Image: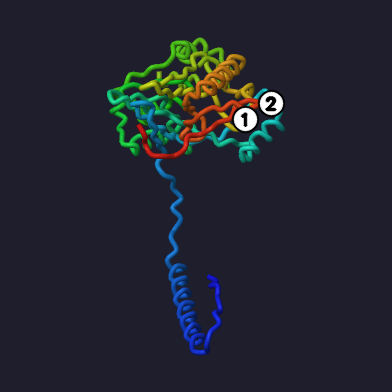
């Protein structure tokens, strides 16, 4: 530790007194710094629990973090590799791996608890499967959930419906998903015709027995006291790229043309109406607004703050 010294002119006795005071101060600081060195704290290397609350009218929304998955930027299509690399770098994403959050949302209406999506459990590796832990950290028990709404039947949204022991994770909840998704993902006939690398996705959907991303991909509009939140599921997988370039799709989109049209329509509507939105693969807590830009759109995340009704 270095100590700045200021020399003050004065009479001899004053200078001597000041020198003595300065020497004592330096000695005390050296003793203090040596004690600090001996009392160094270990790094904690843990993060805060993954939940965040916001109010929509009289409804309390709790964002729940299931974890993250690294997606290869090569999965993004309809733009050159250089364009995608440039868009990622603009938001300080190094690539080619994109750390992609997996979120879910719990809606407390005051009468019911409604969970939108359930996360990936541990079926996609150790970086995912923390939804139940964070649900409990947020003050809730899985048995309290009255209904589970599924945006679509991809494994990172439905695997959390089942415990590692094969039992229902939300024992008292009704499970809702779109018929079009059920007809597609739960069909043994469709599964048999699917490419080999897509087979695991059908199995995951069958184990737990807004169009485009999947045939029945759904968004949910939450409304209370004149306020709204649109939970749009997998409309966006890469916020760094797809807000600026809505025409960029991801390999997982079943109907890529429809996915583009849905994304453009959703962006235009939410930007114009200033609707609060939430996305399963937006950076946690994944809540914010869409802003129109001269070319494309921009993502404006919610600011951390106290709960305000």
Q: Residue at x 49, y 77 (%)?
A: 26
Q: CA distance from mark 2 to mark 1?
A: 10 Å
Which of the labelled discs sits on residue 79, or is there none?
2
The image's mark for residue 241 is 1
Residue 167 visible in the shown view: no
Q: Quadrant of residue 90?
A: top right
**Badge 2: residue crowd in 10 Å (few <14, some 14–19, many ≥20):** some
Residue 20 visible, this angle:
yes
Answer whether labels 2 and 1 touch (C-beta < 8 Å): yes
Residue at figure coordinates x 51%, y 31% from the top left:
282
Return the x and y of residue 262 as percentages of the image width and height. 56, 16
65 relative position to 144: left or right = right
The location of residue 129, given as percent across then percent down, is: 43, 34
Q: Is residue 163 above or below residue 44?
A: above
Q: Position of residue 238 (x, y in %)?
A: 58, 30
> Relative to the observer, which residue lies in front, 206 or 282?
282
Q: Residue at x 58, y 14 (%)?
A: 258
Please determine whether, in this image, residue 296 is positioned above or below residue 303: above
Judged from the image, the secondary structure of the residue bearing numbered disc 2 is: loop
Q: How many marks?
A: 2
């Amino acid at each position: 530790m270095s100590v700045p010294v200021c020399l003050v002119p004065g009479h001899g006795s004053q200078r001597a007194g000041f020198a003595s005071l300065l020497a004592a101060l330096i000695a005390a600081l050296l003793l203090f710094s040596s004690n600090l060195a001996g009392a160094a704290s270990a790094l904690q290397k843990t993060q805060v629990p993954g939940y965040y609350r916001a109010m929509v009218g009289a409804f309390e929304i709790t964002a729940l973090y299931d974890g993250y998955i690294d997606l290869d930027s090569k999965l993004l299509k309809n733009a050159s590799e250089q364009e995608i690399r440039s868009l990622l770098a603009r938001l300080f994403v190094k690539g080619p791996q994109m750390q992609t959050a997996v979120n879910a949302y719990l809606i407390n209406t005051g009468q019911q608890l409604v969970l939108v999506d359930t996360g990936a459990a541990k079926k996609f590796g150790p970086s995912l499967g923390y939804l139940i832990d964070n649900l409990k950290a947020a003050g809730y028990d899985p048995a309290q959930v009255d209904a589970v709404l599924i945006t679509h039947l991809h494994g990172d949204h439905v695997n959390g419906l089942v415990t590692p022991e094969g039992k229902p994770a939300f024992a008292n909840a009704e499970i809702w998903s779109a018929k079009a998704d059920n007809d597609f993902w739960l069909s043994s006939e469709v599964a048999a015709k699917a490419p080999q690398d897509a087979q695991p996705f059908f199995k995951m959907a069958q184990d737990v027995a807004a169009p485009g991303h999947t045939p029945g991909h759904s968004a949910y509009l939450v409304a209370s006291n004149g306020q709204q939140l649109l939970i749009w599921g997998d409309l966006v997988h890469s916020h760094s790229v797809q807000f600026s370039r809505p025409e960029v799709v991801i390999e997982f989109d079943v109907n890529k043309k429809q996915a583009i049209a849905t994304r453009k329509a959703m962006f235009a509507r939410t930007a114009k109406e200033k609707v609060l939105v939430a996305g399963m693969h937006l950076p946690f807590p994944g809540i914010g607004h869409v802003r129109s830009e001269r070319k494309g759109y921009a993502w404006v995340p919610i600011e951390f703050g106290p709960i305000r009704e």
